[in-house]
Amino acid sequence: MSIVLIFVAVMSAIAIWWLSQQRLASKPWLEVGMVGDFAGPGPARLPAAKLGLFVFLSIVCAVLTLLISAFFMRMAPDWRPLPEPMLLWVNTGVLVFSSVALQRARVAARRGEMDGLKTGLIAGGASALAFLAGQLLVWRQLHDGGYFLAGNPAVGFFYLLTAVHGVHLLGGMVALGRTAAKIWRGATATQLRLSAELCATYWHFLLVVWVVLFGLLLLTSRFAGFAQQLADFICGVPGG
């Protein structure tokens, strides 16, 4: 559990530093002047939506860290590494493209370019759906190959981790759809700047999470012995 405690400590330190920069301890009733006139020293206050996303991502990181720790702790003699479906590499490339597309939408929103914003949102959303479809195909390939949920703990963890990641991606699709709906209701690119930024940030986060999960799969499929030694080290099991 030491890796979990280290992660929690690091995330807590980052959260405390970030919150300290937002002047959350200030007393607005003591400020002099009209509302909105006082800028105050230091960086501007963080929008509530950004702060909420940061807190949410911190919670997701904590949950994923616990799952990954359980992943290593569960490794035992009955742990049989999964094969490495080539489709996972394709899916990873698709998710990278989705993240890049939403970053382009973010930049377009900053510049007030509605066409670029629309193109980025459509491309990002379509490629995210393609990623999810590709993950389902990987599940189908594993099932057809005899890798069932209850037959091997490695398979069970693969299904669990990819399902958790997919659910969070679906949640991001909801936010992406709401942003797109605002466009059809006549919102300008400037008005959608914050929404595009939040979507891009969330997608970048999901990409990093997937790279970590994909790395775990490669670690256990190509270097099963090393992965077992690493699991023993994390769990505090003395070497044989």
Image (cartoon, rainbow, N blue to C red):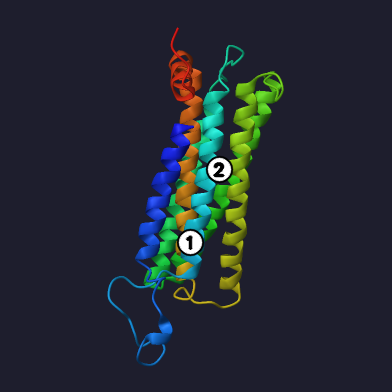
Q: Residue at x 39, y 72 (%)?
A: 45
Where disc 2 sits, the SS reads helix
Which of discs 2 and 1 lies nearer the camera? The answer is 2
Q: Is residue 55 above or below residue 127?
A: below
Q: Position of residue 33 (x, y in %)?
A: 35, 92
Please tell me which residue lies in front, 81 or 178: 81
Q: Which residue is mark 2?
A: 63
Q: Amino acid at mark 1?
A: Leu
Viewer can see residue 199: no
Q: Residues within 10 Å of mark 2 (few under 14, many from 20)?
A: some
Tell me the quarter of the image containing the C terminus.
top left
Q: Is residue 145 above or below residue 34?
A: above
Q: Position of residue 153 (x, y in %)?
A: 63, 22
Q: Position of residue 213 (x, y in %)?
A: 50, 34
Where disc 1 sits, the SS reads helix
Q: Is residue 152 above or below residue 179?
A: above
> What is the residue that sits farthest to the top in this orientation?
240
Q: Which residue is mark 1?
A: 198
Q: Residues within 10 Å of mark 1 (few under 14, many from 20)?
A: many
Q: Position of residue 79 (x, y in %)?
A: 59, 16
Q: Quadrant of residue 133?
A: top right
Please tell me which residue lies in front, 201 or 58: 58
> What is the residue that sits farthest to the bottom in this orientation?
34
Sequence-earlier tag: 2 or 1 = 2
